[in-house]
Amino acid sequence: MNKWLSMLFDIVGLHSLHRKKSLQTQFCNDGSLQPFTITPNRSSFYQLDTIPDVLFELTDQKNYLLASYSYNSPIHSEDKVNNMAKGMCYLSHNDEEPVHVIIVHGWRSDSLNKFKSIFLKQMQKKEFNVYFPTLPYHFDRASNSLYSGEYMISANVCRTITAIRQAVVEIRALIQWLKENKGGKVILIGISLGGYISNLVSLYEKEIDVLVSVMYANNLSYEIWHTPIGKHIKEDLKKNNFTYEQLQEYWSILRADEAKPLVPKDNILLISGKYDQYVTEQDANNLWLAWGKPRRLLYPSGHAGILFNRKKIAKDTMNFIEDSIANGSE
């Protein structure tokens, strides 16, 4: 796909995205999390103290088990509905040498259909167990929100920090529960915001065997301030005299390039779009360089390449996972 067509698709997508915006200011900065923005011990902020019990409701299908799952979030927010971590999964009947794939969706997603269309059939052919966690404040995890994900990333500075922290620790909890109760390999795949969250998880979770991050961000404050995706949030912050320098300071603990992942570099695949209008190539490059240049694929597409290149994304991802598993077994 050529540059101008890729950019056009992204511009149309952004226009559609911005049709819905918060009807009132979301700005709030109570300063309660400021000590974490200056602490050198980032790992304590994303620490998982105990592994929660994960409960499943199973439905037996022809070739797999379809289930919803839930557990108490290790990080509590002010919204009780948001404090139950949940998701859905497709489980193989094959329990020998299980491979668990966790696929993390993007910001403002209102369904999982797009993410299933990319990966699910290929994963099921390999008899992988596939998990789709629901990010904080998405789907049915928010009370009275105008759109899915409205409260996860917003001009509410501290709530955004808590939501990102919550997402990271919840996924860590699921990974550790799987390792402790099911064994096998854990593959973490994130797309868009899910890629950014997965990158953060990899900094603090040693039980990830393979990481694949697709159209990911690195520095949330930079993306909100310097790309169209953060247009309305930036306006809300500026109306309340909150500067970019302040946002950088508060959200520094949310940067993925401030530490090295615990996943071996050979088991990391980064996929970016060269003409992405949601996530800048510079920001994606910064992470790649900070992490020591792991395997990276740069598609000639924009962020909409998530859809238009879904077959290529699936093929590249599956090949990388299989190669990483095979090399790890030698």
Image (tube, grey):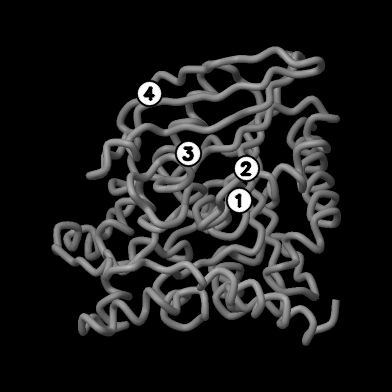
In the displayed structure image, the side of residue 141 where residue 90 appears, left or right = right
The amino acid sitting under disc 1 is: Gly
Relative to 315, is 16 above or below?
A: below
Q: Residues within 10 Å of mark 3 (few under 14, many from 20)?
A: many
The amino acid sitting under disc 2 is: Ile
Quadrant for residue 65, please give it: top right
Q: Residue at x 75, y 70 (%)?
A: 298
* Residue that numbered label 3 is attached to: 171
Question: What secondary structure is marked by label 3?
Answer: helix
Mark 2–mark 3 Cα distance, whole angstroms, equals 10 Å
Question: What secondary structure is marked by label 4?
Answer: loop
Q: Residue at x 27, y 56 (%)?
A: 159
Q: Which of marks 3 and 1 is nearer the N terminus?
A: 3
Quadrant for residue 40, please give it: bottom left
Mark 4–mark 2 Cα distance, whole angstroms, equals 20 Å
Relative to 282, is 67 above or below?
A: above
The amino acid sitting under disc 4 is: Pro
Q: Where is residue 209 in the image (x, y as percent from the top left)?
A: 63, 38
Q: Residue 103 carries which label?
A: 2
* Residue that numbered label 4 is attached to: 52
Decide which of 209, 187 is in the foreground and name it: 187
Q: Position of residue 211 (x, y in %)?
A: 63, 47
User: Do tag 2 and tag 1 residues touch (Cβ < 8 Å)?
Assistant: yes
Question: What secondary structure is marked by label 2?
Answer: strand
